Amino acid sequence: MTTPARRGVIHDIGYRPFTGRRQSTGVVAWSLYLTSLRHCFGLGRSGKSKVMPWLMTALLLIPALVLAGLLLQLNKMSLSDQANLFAPLSNYFGFPYWTQLLITIFAAAQAPVLFARDLRYRTIVLYFARPLSRTLYVLMRLAALTTALFAVVVIPLTIWYGAALGANVDRGEHTKNYLAAVVGVAVLALMLATFGGMVSAITTRSGLAVTAVIVALMLSSGIVTAVQGAAYDGGHRTMSFVGALFNPFSIAAELISGLFDQPTPSPSVLHPGPGWTIGFAIAAVCWTLGAAAILVARTRKAASL
């Protein structure tokens, strides 16, 4: 006669069971979002983790305060100085384009905090001990990083806009440009968050991820700027628009310029027509969904190991 296989037995070794109220998946996801958002600014982490995000936030405030001061002093300037400053002082989306190095550093420094460490140290499996899907985990992390990027850019813009409301300028024009810039910043923050998260999930090493994000974004920005400058000098509009597709900052600038009839942040950044505006909208979607799909796939693979 064959001996039946022994079945596993659960032994009670005295651990106290959990008797509290179990929260829903939505509450778990919301808690993950809030925790991730706090970590983007170093809250709840070590002191040195707070240096980089708050330093970048402070540096982004400086040009906005300067622009706000110029707006408040505009009526005391000569007519020629006012004429030279009217256009730059109403070009709100020029702000993230001009300060893209600081924004890139913020995104590059905080993306590994949310994505690289969990994958590298295998702590990501602990998140899925509760009924939290891989996709929802990625979405909450991305939402937190997008919110942080949006906040550090929109707050200086709002200070600039608040000064404009108290100055002797066309408030209707400034309001229109400000709202258009807010939409552009939201699109830009989403593209930067997904790209930074994708690179961080692939590398899983914080230092390498920070370097890779900065190099990729700034190198592409330099190439795009050079291509657009050459296209502007040669009168090649198509080459200028094609070159702009390879960097999130130029995509957002062209998209907002075309959608809301906004001034471009640089003379070499040409104003797109309806066809190219649709093309830049598609490019923004591709940048976002493509990077997010790779990020979700990487997370699923790591969680299944």
Image (tube, helix red, strand yellow):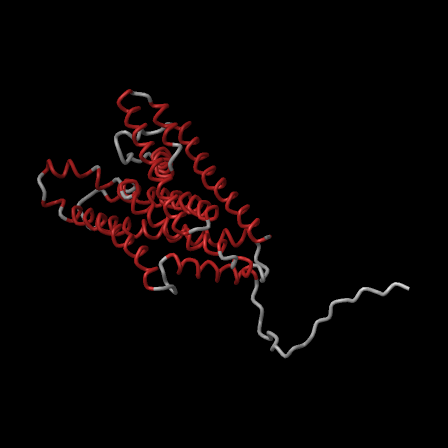
Residue 152 horizontal/vertical position (percent)? 32, 52
Residue 176 horizontal/vertical position (percent)? 31, 42
Seen as rendered, the residue at the extreme bottom is 14
Q: Reply above or below: 101 against 24.
A: above
Q: Quadrant of the N terminus?
A: bottom right
Q: Is residue 304 left or right of residue 97?
A: right
The quarter of the displayed image where residue 218 is located: top left
Could you tell me which residue is drawn at 44 percent across and 34 percent down? Answer: 283
In front here: 167 or 279?
Answer: 279
Could you tell me which residue is drawn at 36 percent across and 42 percent down? Answer: 184
Could you tell me which residue is drawn at 43 percent across and 30 percent down? Answer: 279
Q: Is residue 37 left or right of residue 98?
A: right
Residue 23 horizontal/vertical position (percent)? 56, 66
The quarter of the displayed image where residue 127 is located: bottom right
Q: How many marks?
A: 0
Q: Reply above or below: 212 against 244.
A: below
In front here: 209 or 247?
Answer: 209
In front here: 170 or 117?
Answer: 117
